[in-house]
Image (tube, rainbow, N blue to C red):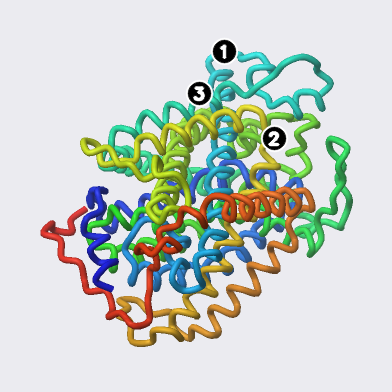
Amino acid sequence: MEAYEADIKKSQLKRVLGKWSLTAIGIGAIIGGGIFVLTGTGAYYNAGPALALSFVIAGIACVFAALCYAEFASILPVEGSAYAYAYGTVGEIFAWIIGWGLILEYAMGSMTVAVSWSGYFGKLLKMFGLHLPAWLTTDPQTYLAAGNSGFSMNLPAFIIVLVVISILLRGTKGAAKANNFIVMLKVAAIIFVIVAGAFFIDPANWTPFIPEPTVITENGVSHSAYGYAGIIAGASAIFFAYVGFDAVSTQAGEAINPKKDVPFAIIASLLICTLLYILVSLVLTGMMHYSDFNPLGKYPDAIKAPVAYAFDIAGQAWAGYIITIAATVGLISVLMVMIMGQSRIFLGMSKDGLIPRTFSKVNAETGVPSKNLMILGGVISVVAAFTPINDLAHMTSFGTLFAFTMVCVAVWVLRVKQPNLQRNFRVPALPVIATLGILINIYLIINLSIEAQTYSAIWLLFGFVIYFLYSRKNSKLQNGGFGETFKAEQEPLEEIEIDIDNKD
């Protein structure tokens, strides 16, 4: 793999991230939309109090995928995540499909978090007596469904994306330091929610723990909710909340000791955050009845800022201040990590010639793909300003589940094709783990909403069109250049030596 090793060594990205910074990046991405927002949407639209079981199922599905990610990361220390892992194992066309799915995952995830941030920011302003008009904080579809007329957009969601882009343009090291601080703040806030909220739980809100199946109609669209099917649908809907450990792998090109630290960070961040998700969902649905998260009901803003509103309804407004401030600041790091991950996926695809070269141009001074980030910021900010949060979250989950499925396939294929390849981490009982990961992720895709499946299928079809009209013609691999990540006849990639102490 001499050609590929050389490609890694000449990377313009700066290796500045140790294992705890990488773990913080994972936690920074995982703890955010899932805890501060999707606990409300998942409880109301899908599972009720049994949302805790949805998080358990989603967490189990993630463990299988995370182990496969960890093995790949120990072999292939570059940016690009699942796209890079699949490139040489299941072929360029499949790698393109995964990359296209990851674009959906990260872009929609960033937009979801931007809208979530807007909800908490609006609540924060209200605490200080400031009120933004509904037409400046609501997407057009939701605004019209509430009986309003005229123009509307989510201005705070639009602005926060641009703010985050300005931070990322300054360089990864500075962004990582900011993320580390915000992660500590978020974890402290989540522990506070669990401990303080436990005193205000009304067990009656948990009865029945698994509500009877029913049909919810909103904006003229109906879907089934609750019951055991609702638990599975809830796991599918909130799955994007776990994308943080995938974000760790996108930063491998900037890790100091990627073959060891990336697998550690992937598994550590997933285990820590799964436990926190389960506890918070139990506390939240115990404090506030799941039906009160109705966006057209008594507390219309509760679905955007469920944790803070749960304390408000419990008569503990002082706690709401703490949570709202922590969530408002904390969601910034989630958005930061997701946009950063998306830009690195674009970087990897651009290096292989599958998307325009402008996405792989790295600023020599800051060590980040500046033009890449600016283009992303423009698209994400506009879509976040005009799209409902529920549609964004479901489409993100599809991209995540699809990528996880393909990684489980690819790591198995690679183990068969190159059993002697150096692996600092090996998935135990790989056939069993990979099979379970594939089956569970596909099952969760099937249980996504029809709208999410339809929109995502259209997205994938659009991706095929782009591949055959542009990417295949400009691919380095198709034009005789270096593109394959793995080749059977090549020697295993040697350990990369970096003269930097792995201190964090």
Work out whether 270 lies above or below 199.
below
Give the label on residue 130, or none. Answer: 1
- Residue highlighted by disc 3: 159
Which residue: 38% across, 34% down?
371
Q: CA distance from mark 1 to mark 2?
A: 24 Å
423 lies left or right of 278: left
Q: CA distance from mark 1 to mark 3?
A: 18 Å
Work out whether 94 lies above or below 466.
below
**Secondary structure of residue under mark 3:** helix
Place of residue 179 in the rendered image (x, y in percent of width and height, measured from the top left): 35, 41
**Secondary structure of residue under mark 1:** loop
Q: Earlier in the sequence, mark 1 or mark 3?
A: 1
Is any atom of residue 420 visible in this view?
yes
**Which residue is farthest left?**
499
Which residue: 80% across, 56% down?
226
Type of residue at label 1?
Leu
Type of residue at label 2?
Pro
Question: Is 348 or 214 nearer to us in this picture?
Answer: 348
Give the label on residue 388, or none. Answer: 2
1 vs 3, front mark? 3
